[in-house]
Image (cartoon, helix red, strand yellow):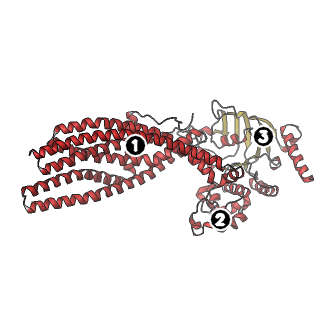
Amino acid sequence: MTGLPGRAAAPDLTGRAALGHVRMAAGLALRAAPASLIGLIVFTLVDGTVPIAVAWLTGRILDGLISGLAAWSLVWLAVALAATGVGAVVLPRLTGYAAAEVDRQVRLTAADRLYTALTGRLQGLATLENPQFHDSLRLAQEAGGTAPGDLVRHGMGMVRNVVTLTGFLGTLVLVNPWLVLAVAVAAVPTTRAEILLSRLRAAAMWRIGYAGRRQFFYANLLTAPREAKEVRLFGLGAFFRGRMLAELRSANADSRLLDRRELRIQTVLGVLGAVVAGAGLVWAVLSTRSGRLTEGELMVFVAALAGVQSSLLGLVGQFGAVHNAVLLLDHYHVAMTLPPDLPLRATPTPLPPLLEAIEFDDVWFRYGPDHPWVLRGVSLVIPAGSATALVGLNGAGKSTVVKLLCRLYDPTRGRIRWNGVDLRDTDPAELRNRIGAVFQDFIEYELSGAENIGLGDVVRLDDRDRITAAARRAGVHDALARLPKGYDTMLTRMFIEGIDTEDPDTGMLLSGGQGQRLALARALMRDDRDLLILDEPSSGLDAEAEAEVHAELRRHRAGRTSLLISHRLNTVRDAGQIAVLADGEIVERGTHDTLTVRDGIYARLFALQARGYAESSAE
């Protein structure tokens, strides 16, 4: 199946894959914030030595006071201890700032790389129309936003704990090597338990994350403006609230189970660590009483024992966090290495101007090997310089023809040629740059009116004259001009931006018909392209507005190549050629006049619609 694979459980990585993810995160950090990363490494290493220095200097001062060390020597030791204390206060803050800056820059770079990879590889719609892809994409977005920074931050935490642990272990070796062995033995179950907990956390996070996304989906239904009418009309508030709370309870149950396991395991490990520490302290006190240790060495020993246990627990905990980050990074890695959903030629064939025709040659298509055929041997010639209309009942395959023509999919069998050039051999971006289109499921972006239109030709986004001309041809100029800020009014109530920050009430919502005109204006920004596709461009308009729009479109497309798709046959009767699509096949082809006298599907549909208009007028 195309797209990111759906998974029922958290990924289980091999050592080589995990190492690859670590290298990827390190590369991201080095590329995104090299100076901050170097600072983070330096601060971490120095910070790891501070507890050791504090313990040794304190012990030296204590022994010096007891043994009567010279005053100037004590002063220098005190100054050094004070400086170390300053480092103990400042270094964690510097480390935290550097880590936060690395995290910010890595998050930005990771998002840029993710969406650059996705938009570069996903040239079509096959992956985007796969529901498993969207669930995995959300995980990849979360991983790209947090996992690389977490891995770097916790990895540096491991380095700090290793530095501190090494220093204190050296101290214990000098005092009592057998105690080092006891600490090492006690560390084995701690490490194994933390690895187990890490795996449990990863599995729980997978389940909790899925429930969290479902909870957000239901919560959004309760407040989203688009769904608000139906939710309130059908009284769905309690239903969706119940679903939302059920997902939240499921997440809470998984989280509670994990917390209980952690509580049991950490309690046992804490008792074990306390027993080892207690035994060590008893030995140290007795050794000091017998004169084998000085008071200063006792203080250093106590600090070293506490430091070893603290560093060891911190190291194991950081290892668990790194393990979780590596598991999350697998989702990001899968998204970054997603294969293209359209085969792209290394050297695409240049697309010539459309001077002859577009030809569908025995085109078959289905959306997957286990799906039914949507198109069955479609053969159709769209001559250059004239209008071709495609009509048929819902589900006949008209929208699929448009998707293939824009190369959002490739035919399963057969070919589509543009002036004799197979679309498979061309660059999809070059092909789409030759096409202007308005789709039945048009989009009204939550941007200003001017930007909504200008996006039709983004290189001319600031060409207000061209935007205004397109709006006039689509019949939406007056509606936009009457808005509080004219064309600069935000067409949304969801957020404010730019000029609307001064007056939040200026955000406006257009009616359905006005939104459709806006989408038409966006398509008309490309009035110099080779092909214009109009997929139900007036389905949301009243009869008067529909007549007005189609009159303007007839003037605009005169002498141009266009493909018209509509259920309202009166809007396509002037097309140079009308093709009737039924059950994925072209069953009729001709002009309006020739088709109406054949008494076929077109004639029957046209008669039904004409009769409906006549009966409505009579009433």
Residue indicated by mark 1: 24
Alpha carbon of mark 1 to alpha carbon of mark 2: how far? 45 Å
- Mark on residue 478? none
- Which quadrant: the N terminus? top right
Q: Characterize the local packing of mark 3: few (<14), some (14-19) or many (20 or more) Cα atoms within 10 angstroms.
A: some
Q: Is residue 114 above or below residue 415?
A: below
- Mark on residue 393? 3
* Figure quadrant of residue 263: top left
In percent of the image, x 51 and y 47: which residue is there?
Answer: 115
Q: Is residue 195 found left or right of 344 in the rendered image?
A: left
Q: Characterize the local packing of mark 2: few (<14), some (14-19) or many (20 or more) Cα atoms within 10 angstroms.
A: many
Residue at the right extreme? Answer: 618
Q: Is residue 390 found left or right of 117 in the rendered image?
A: right
Residue indicated by mark 2: 487
Q: Is residue 420 found left or right of 292 in the rendered image?
A: right
Alpha carbon of mark 2 to alpha carbon of mark 3: how far? 37 Å
Name the amino acid, label 2. Tyr
